[in-house]
Amino acid sequence: MGIFDKFSSSKALNQQNATSVLKNDTTEFAYQLLLTQIGGDINRKYIPKIESFLKKHETRIDILKATAELCHPFDTPKKLYISSTAYVWAGATCRKQAIECLTKYIELGGTWEGFGEDYLTTLENNISIPRSKLNLAFLYLDLSKAYEGEYLLDEAAQSARESLKFYPGYPSYNQLARVLIKLGLFDDALNELDNFRSSRYYSEDFFVQFNKLYIEIKDKKARGYKYKPRPQR
């Protein structure tokens, strides 16, 4: 290899490294932006850039959408964490994007390098489960709610069931029961709540919410309730 070939090769490598650093910094900037919306300690060196960015976006939804878009293409766990979280918090206008990013993020394990130590989390009745399992449970729960919002009820029910595999707690049982109501499967909804009530995860802390939902299902079954989706805009 001649001296000019070496120079060209070195220049190309430096450009590649510079591009990689730039991409990583953009992703980190997106992460810092996300923290301004969901809470967290912000790296002070990004504050001037963040302030400038926020002035260009009027609403919180605009900020969250723009934050997610900074991570495109969504090809790393960190980018998928940022984008899926931003789209979920942005709500109804971003449900389809949330479904896409949550699905990809779960496929990659639902964790990234900033997740931290996988310590045990103590829940109701002093039950401890790994933080990673709890995180996956809530990712599937978010996915279920996004599917439900898009009237994809079978997918919503399946995602709620997946959530239960990682943490069979009240949030996921509540979500599954509510989706089953919309599907007209009242007995299935009651059976799922009975399963929760007989499990070691049930606590009297849930009694009021649980009892209210149980009575609601029985009442809707007796009335012959049929779910009617709202017309999509």
Image (cartoon, rainbow, N blue to C red):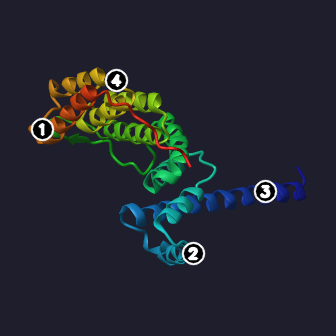
> Going from the N terminus, do you reach mark 4 or mark 3 first?
3
Could you say which disc has been placed on residue 185 in the image? 4
Could you say which disc has been placed on residue 12 in the image? 3
Camera-near label (1 vs 3) is 1
Q: Which residue position holds label 1?
A: 207
In this rendering, would 87 be left or right of 23?
A: left
Give the spatial CA distance, label 4 vs label 1. Answer: 22 Å
> Going from the N terminus, do you reach mark 2 or mark 4 first?
2
Residue at 54%, 75% in the rendered image: 49
Q: What amino acid type should be assigned to the residue bearing mark 2?
A: Lys
In the image, 155 versus 73, the foreground residue is 155
Q: What amino acid type should be assigned to the residue bearing mark 1?
A: Phe
Q: Quadrant of residue 214?
A: top left
Q: Position of residue 101 (x, y in %)?
A: 53, 44
Residue at 55%, 58% in the rendered image: 27
Q: Quadrant of residue 124?
A: top left
Q: Which residue position holds label 2?
A: 56
Q: Position of residue 86 (x, y in %)?
A: 47, 55
Label 4: element kind: loop
Q: Position of residue 208 (x, y in %)?
A: 13, 41
In the image, 155 versus 28, the foreground residue is 155
Could you say which disc has been placed on residue 107 in the image? none
Residue at 15%, 24% in the rendered image: 198
> Going from the N terminus, do you reach mark 4 or mark 1 first?
4
Q: Are marks 2 and 1 in contact (CB under 8 Å)?
A: no
